[in-house]
Each structure stands twice: as structure tokens, then as C-alpha cells.
Amino acid sequence: MTFEIILLLSIIVAAGIGFGSGWFVKNNIGKNKLVNADLKAKKIIEDAEKESANIKKEKLLEVKDEWYRKKQEYEQEVNSRRSKLQSFEKQLDGREDNLERRVELVNKKEKEIATVKKTYEEKIKQADEKNLHLNRLINEENQKLEKVASMSRDEAKKNLMENLIVDAKTEASQTLKEVRDSARAEAKKEAQKVIIQAIQRSATDHCVESTVSVLQIQNDEMKGRIIGKEGRNIRAFEAATGVDVIVDDTPEAVILSAFDPLRREVARLALERLITDGRIHPARIEEIVEKVNKELDEELIHSGENTMIEVGLTGGGPELLRHLGRMKYRSSYGQNLLMHSIEVSHLTGLMAVELGLDSTMAKRAGLLHDIGKTIDRSVEGPHALIGYDLVKKLNEHPIIINSVGSHHDDMPVEYPIAALVQAADAISGSRPGARRESIEAYAKRMERLEEMAKSFEGVAQTYAIQAGREIRVIVEHDKIDDAMADLLAHDIAKKIQTEMGFPGQIKVVVIREKRSVAFAK
């Protein structure tokens, strides 16, 4: 028991000693921490004050630099504005000087104008006085002239006007002649150059006109089969083809006659197949003719394609190609329409190249210019206008449409290529050997040509020569002078062009001569 109490007291004493020593140590450590913290705080404060002082100095330096820079900019701007103001002041001073000088000039001019005006008014006054005096003198002279001439003023004026009109007409005719001669010489020179170059590069055949086709057969026994019993085969054939079949005494030959070459070709091909087949009766005839018609239609398109290739063109639907193919079986005055169109195409293209125009467009216009002749006769109107409607329907270029419609002056010429088509058409149609004309039509054309020239006053005789390509007009020398002769030639040519249709061109030559005859006895 005592030992436990002693142990317990020992423990309590040890605990008290430990607690006291701990409190002492802790107290000393806390004081050291406070001292250290104060020292650190003072050091931080000192560092902060130093740093703030440095920052303050830096900011003050930046502010001073900025202020100095702004000051320099301001001074520069002030100097610039000051220099501008000085230049403006100089300009204003100069303008003021100019204005002062102008004011002085204006004042001087006003004084001069006033002086001139005064002088002008005095001269007008003097002129009026002289005019009155002159009118009095003129009236006195007119009265004296009327007494001397025994003619009133109006009569004299009328005679003078008539003389002036005659003189004016003579001078106008002479001037017109000179202008026309000069223009004609230049135009003829250039036109001949272009046309000759085009013609020299083109060569075509002469025309061959025919309205019949001769079909050779193996023997004359076939003629009986072609005619058939009581002529039923030949009647059926003629009804199906629209062609007259002539079976005569010509050995081993049958003649097919028709003005339409396309129908004649259908009849020839159909009859050849019937003869080869040997079965000739009305039903077979209709079958063969229908089959040939279809094949020939395909052949027309193929021919149109070949024509386009020959001319060097591309493009065109089946309808256009079909019409081109039909040209192969059309003729005008004995001239094959397709050959004529190809020739016109080449000529137009060559002239277009010489003039710097679109040769491809010119060739196409020349090729299609007579396409209206391939339309069925049930469509009425000039072939140029019919062709115009057709190419317009086929959506051709406006230049080609105008060229087709205007190549016979049925409508105005709007493009240079249209004029070239007219010239090429005339060249192709009027060259020697190009066309044929019946004797009756030729004689009537010559008579009408001479009558039209005789209808003018002062014409004594007229002679149509060179197959109607030239008309020579002999005038009465006492009624038509040299200047009026040129005007008469122009009027006759204009009337022929307006009232008469003809291929190519007609030259009008007016001849004026005075013959003096005496007899030695």
C-alpha cells in the first residue's frame, strides 16, 4: 500500500514536472515564432516598399515618355497645320491678286465694249441710211429698166427663174455625172477585182435541159408486158408515178416524159425493177413505186449530206438535207439547181474571204439561197419568200434568212453577205452557157426591153444586143445634151430594174451624136 502510494505520488510529481517543462518549452518556442514572424513581416514590408518605389519610378518614366511623345506629335501636327495655313494664305493672296487683275481687265473690257457698241450703233445708223438710199436707187433703176425692156418686174423674175432652173439642172446633171463616174470607177474596180478572183477559182458545166428519160430494155417483147392487157399496166404505172410512158417504134427503148425530174427518176427506177422482176401488174406496180419513193427519199438525204461535205459545211437536220437533195432534180432555165447553188456557194465564199467576211456563213447562204424552188407548187408566192419562210422555220442564222429572202430584192438587204449572194447568183445565172431560154420568151423579152427604153422623151432608136445583156439607146442630140444623157441612162436602168425580171444584169448605153451631111455636086 505504501509502495503504491509512493509510486502514484512519483507519477504525479513526474507528470507535474513534465507539464511544467513542456509549458516552458512551448512558451519559449512561441515567442521565437512571433519574433521570426515579425522579422519576416518587416522584411516583406520593406521588399514591398522597395518594389512599389521601383514600379512608381518605372511608371513615372513611362508617363514622361508618353507625354514627351504626345508633345512631339502635337507639335508636328501644329507645325503641319501652320504650314497648311501659310500655304492657304499664300493661295488666297494669289487669288486676290488674280481677282484684282481680272476686275481690272473686266473694267477695261466693259469700257472697250461700250466704245464698240457706240461705234456699231453709229455704223448701223449709217447703214440704214445707205440702205434707204440704195432702195430708192434700185426702185428708180427698176422703173427705168421696165420702161426700156417693156417688161414688168414679175415677168422678168419669171424669165430669170426659168433660166436659173435650166442652168441648175444642167449643172446638177454635170455634177451628178462626175460623182457617178468617180464612184462607178472606184466601185467597178474593186468589184471586178473581187468577182474576177472568185470566178477564176470556180469552174462549172454548161446547162443541159431535158424533160425525158430513155430506158433501155432487152427486147421489144417487154413493151407488150409494160403496156399490159388493154393498156392496164401502163395506165396504172402513169397513175402511180405521174409520168407519161411513151412506147413507140424506137428499138429496145421506152421513153419516160415529165417536167418534174424527181417523178421521172422515180418512174425510171420503178420500171427498171419491174422489168428485172418480170412481174408486171397493177398491184405490183403500186408496191414497187411506193418502195422506190421511200428509197429515193433516203437517197435525197444522202445527197444533201454529200452536198454539205462538198461545199465544206456541217449541220442541218433531215428536212434541210432532203430539200438540198431535191435540188438535184430541179432546174431553172435548163440550169441544174443543185449545181447552180453549189456554184453560188463557192463564189459567195470566195468573195467573202476577199472582203474579210465570214466565209462559212457566206457559203451556207449561197447554198440555200434557192431552197424555195424545192417547195411544192401548191405553196404560192415568189421562191425567195418561200425559201425565207422555210429557212426561218429551220432556225437558220438571221444572215442566212435575210440572204435567202432578199436575193431577188423581194425584201431589203440587211447584211453584206446578202449582197454577195445577189452578186454570186447573177454571176452563176448570167455566165455564157449557164441557162437556156425559149425562142418565144427571148423575143418577147427583147421587144419589151426596147419598148421600155423608147418610152422616154428624146429617145430616137433602141437596140437590144448581146442576148439582152445590153440595150443601146440613140437620142436626139437637139433635145438631150451630154449631161442629160447620163441622167437618162440612169432613169432607163432604174425603170428596167423595177418593172422587168431578168437574170444577171443589163447594161444601158446612151449614144448622143450630131451628124452633119453635105453633098458635093
Image (cartoon, helix red, strand yellow):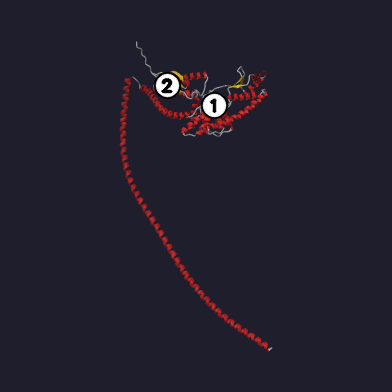
Question: Dividing the picture into quarters, in which one does residue 113 lie?
Answer: top left
| Residue 30 screen position, x and y as percent | 56, 78
Q: Residues within 10 Å of mark 1 (few under 14, many from 20)?
A: many
Identify the residue under disc 2.
510
Q: What residue type is labelled 1?
A: Leu
Q: Is mark 1 on a helix, strand or loop?
A: helix
Along the viewing direction, whichever of 216 and 501 lies nearer the viewer: 216
Along the viewing direction, whichever of 164 and 102 lies nearer the viewer: 164
Q: What quarter of the picture does the N terminus occupy?
A: bottom right
Q: Which residue lies furthest to the top in this view?
A: 521
Q: What residue type is labelled 2?
A: Val
Labels 2 and 1: the sequence-earlier one:
1
- Is residue 406 visible to the viewer in this orientation of the structure? no
* Disc 2 versus disc 1: nearer the observer: 1
Image position of 340 (left or right of 61): right
Q: What quarter of the picture does the C terminus occupy?
A: top left
Q: Please say if 496 is above or below 305.
A: above
- Is residue 284 visible to the viewer in this orientation of the structure? yes
Q: Please say if 104 is above or below 230.
A: below
| Residue 225 screen position, x and y as percent | 66, 20
Identify the residue under disc 1.
337
Question: Dividing the picture into quarters, in which one does residue 493 lie?
Answer: top left
Residue in view at x 54 percent, y 77 percent? 34
Along the viewing direction, whichever of 41 and 468 lies nearer the viewer: 468
Res. 93 mark: none
Image position of 110 (left or right of 208): left
